[in-house]
Image (cartoon, helix red, strand yellow):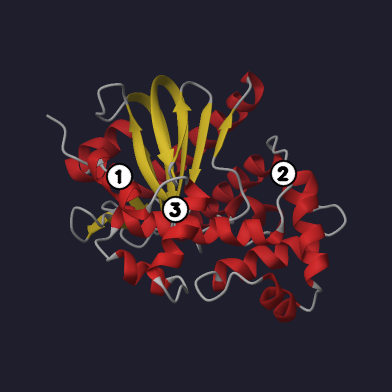
Amino acid sequence: MVEIGQRDVIDIAYGNPDRRHAGVEVLTFDALKRRLKSSVARFPSRLDFHQVMLVRGGAGTAMVDFITHPCARGTLLHVRPGQVQRLPYGADGRPAALDAVLVLFTGDFPPPLPQTDAVRDGCLGPVAWRLPHDEFEALDRAVTELDAEYRTLLGEHRDVELTGALLRQLVAALLIRMARLADPARSALVGPGAEAYLAFRRELERSFAGTRSVEDYAARLGYSPRTLTRACLAATGRSAKQIADARVALQAQRLLAHTDMPVASIAGALGFSEATNFGKFFARETGRTPGDFRRGQWAFDSPLP
């Protein structure tokens, strides 16, 4: 992991200090805390790689895209590239005392499989699971095997090519196990309208800064606006317009929290012609003005005693 930028912009690029070009790393939460600068461990950051964390013991609270997730034995967290996270912290705001193992990997490391698309996709897959005992045991065995093979990769007597190939398959197997976990949204991705919904979400991820118009997306994808809205309602209970607005609001939150861009510049970057219109939109979506939200995040980011 490589820190980039100033205190208010903590971007984490993938970097494995043990095997620079491996594309994967397995380590404990304690090892990660020892490696990171205190600013990264205590403040929110953005990743350009995948981070899967399985908690085996201890307690804390993680934050991913401004939503908190309690962490205890049986918690599984998956942070995707571009998402904002704060590493699990305790009641005192300091990094939590967790017994946890992390699997870090670049997006192109595991072989692409259609069965894992929803897990790997940041706009579709869940962030957190609370695993029942049997599923926790299965995931724990999976990450234990990954850890063992990763240690083999670091050893003196290894076949790097074969071990790397095995690690790719093991990460893919981990993602398949995650795809099998209970997710209420998954059933909607295979029913009527699923294809239209998935196409809309992926096009939205590419183009949200340019347009929030359902009509624009419908024209690009070859569906009617009514079809897209029906598909989104069936999949999520929200209309296509509500989903588009929520995605823009999330990006606005990321920019407000982690850059010093003026509000007017953020408004322009997200397709608003007037900062006042952006302010009304943001307040409607989040319940706070852009300025209030930013001040709250910077207070949250203030150094601990």
Write the residue at 68% across / 74% down. 217
Which of discs 1 and 3 lies nearer the camera? The answer is 1
Label 3 environment density (alpha carbons within 10 Å; few <14, some 14–19, many ≥20): many
Q: Quadrant of residue 103?
A: top left
Query: Which residue does the numbered mark 2 point to in the structure image?
Result: 185
Q: Secondary structure at mark 3?
A: loop
Q: Quarter of the image containing the C terminus?
A: top left
Q: Quadrant of residue 205?
A: bottom right
Please give left or right for residue 77 compared with residue 303 in the image. right
Label 1 environment density (alpha carbons within 10 Å; few <14, some 14–19, many ≥20): some
In space, the residues marked 2 and 1 are separated at their CA atoms by 30 Å
Coordinates of residue 204 in the picture (x, y in percent): 60, 67
Mark sitting on residue 297: 1
Label 2 environment density (alpha carbons within 10 Å; few <14, some 14–19, many ≥20): some
Write the residue at 36% across / 67% down. 266
Q: Secondary structure at mark 2?
A: loop
For marks 1 and 3, the one nearer the N-term is 3
In space, the residues marked 1 and 3 are separated at their CA atoms by 16 Å
Q: Secondary structure at mark 1?
A: helix
Is 111 drawn above or below residue 237 in the view shown?
below
Query: Do the residues bearing badges 3 and 2 touch, measured as CB atoms within 8 Å?
Result: no
Query: Which residue does the numbered mark 3 point to in the structure image?
Result: 83
Please give left or right for residue 243 compared with residue 48 in the image. right
